[in-house]
Amino acid sequence: MLEEAYAMSAYSCNFLVQSFTAGHIRVPVKQLNSDVNGYNGYKLGYYHFSEDEKFGMNVMNRLNERWTCWGQKAFYDRFNQLHREKVVKALQDVVAQIFTAFGDPDFSGDYGAILNQVPEPDTRMQNNYPLFRVADDGRLLRRYRFNDLSCASTIDNWWGGTLLILSNHTLRRILWFAHQLVIKISVEDIRDNVRQ
């Protein structure tokens, strides 16, 4: 019976581990999927997720512990040791509570002890500005300068399809060259009209 409890817990512990991952902490997945057309919302959420995973995030938990949280790919990297220790401790506490409940049928678990360990962005430390965030009034905002992690300005009038194009470096270059060509043609048209 104890092994069955451990097995059931292992499934839910996947979600606990995910909550310690930088990319899962502040991406507004629900809003992106509902406010941005279908697959575009998913792709934009993944772009935000990947950005936080790559650059990490200064976090804290309700126990006032502070550290830098990284993505899943960096889990076993040396610089990520403190973060890895936090994840392992939370998992060990889950296992310990299951074992306690197995020996004491009156033990109902202390979920707060586990949830208090889950990280949130540290408001005292500087983090990259989020690519997307939800305003207090529920509007989905995006960083004004899409690829500028230090841009604090946000806008609410953007379109997901255009943003996906902007997120693709090759397409951005093609669009830039096309834009320059249009400007050059326009300037030459103006010169020709002025000469006539």
Image (spheres, grey):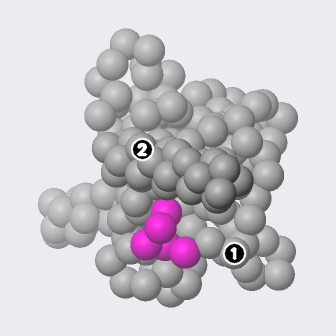
Q: Return the x and y of residue 55 as percentages of the image width and height.
A: 51, 31
Q: Residue 146: x percent and y percent?
A: 59, 50
The answer, for residue 11, to whether it is visible in the render is yes
Q: Quadrant of the N terminus?
A: bottom left
Callout 1: few (<14), some (14-19), or many (20+) C-alpha neighbours within 10 Å?
few
Whether residue 174 is situated above or below residue 112 in the rendered picture: above
Q: CA distance from mark 2 to mark 1?
A: 25 Å
Find the magenta span and give its range.
159-163
Check disc 2 and give the amino acid type.
Answer: Phe
Residue nearest the observer in this picture, 131 or 29 = 131
Three-letter amino acid code at the position of disc 1 = Asn
Q: Earlier in the sequence, mark 2 or mark 1?
A: 1
Q: Is residue 162 magenta?
A: yes
Q: Is residue 138 left or right of residue 40?
A: right
Please name which of the two marks, 2 or 1, marks the residue nearer to the observer.
2
Quarter of the rendering occupied by the C terminus: bottom right
Whether residue 23 is visible, yes or no, is: no
Looking at the picture, does residue 31 appear above or below residue 151? Answer: below
Question: Residue 133 in magenta?
Answer: no
In the image, which disc is placed on residue 177? 2
| Number of numbered discs overlaid on the protein picture | 2
Residue at 62% x, 72% y is: 158
Outermost residue toward the top in this view: 78
Check the image and report above or below for 152 versus 27. Answer: above
